[in-house]
Amino acid sequence: MTITLFSKNNCMQCKMTKRFLTENHVSFKEVNIDEEPNALNFLKEQGFKSVPVTTAGETTIIGFRPDQLRSLAS
């Protein structure tokens, strides 16, 4: 399963999400919306208004939610 983390520069919740995933040995692909404007358009089309957005298959986690992110580590 591919895990994608949509983030942006200077985002504390994004940094905390990246740290949590890394510390729990969860491999993920980071898409920085500041560096990839097309990703921002994609998120807006999906109805998201903030980052981080973490996707894994049918699962979508908005914000820094260790309780939900933990399920990706198992």
Image (cartoon, rainbow, N blue to C red):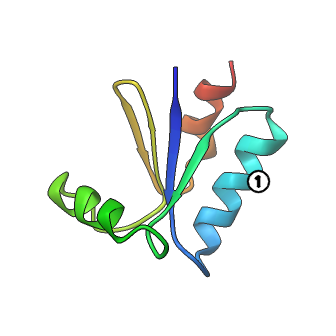
Residue farthest to the right? Answer: 23
**Residue shown at the point (59%, 25%) measured from the top left:** 71
Q: Give the vertical position of 11 relative to 14 (above or below).
A: below
Q: Give the vertical position of 27 relative to 14 (above or below).
A: above
Question: Residue 25: x, y in percent?
Answer: 80, 32
11 or 67, which is in the foreground? Answer: 11
Q: Give the vertical position of 72 relative to 61 (above or below).
A: above
Question: Residue 2: x, y in percent?
Answer: 52, 28
**Residue shown at the point (69%, 34%) measured from the top left:** 27
Residue farthest to the bottom? Answer: 10
Mark 1, Cα crowd under 10 Å, few <14 / some 14-19 / many 20+, is: few
Horizontally, residue 3 falls left or right of residue 44, namely right
Horizontally, residue 24 falls left or right of residue 63, namely right
Horizontally, residue 22 falls left or right of residue 8, namely right
71 or 34, which is in the foreground? Answer: 34
Residue at the disc numbered 1: 19
Q: Quadrant of residue 15?
A: bottom right
Q: Amino acid at mark 1?
A: Arg
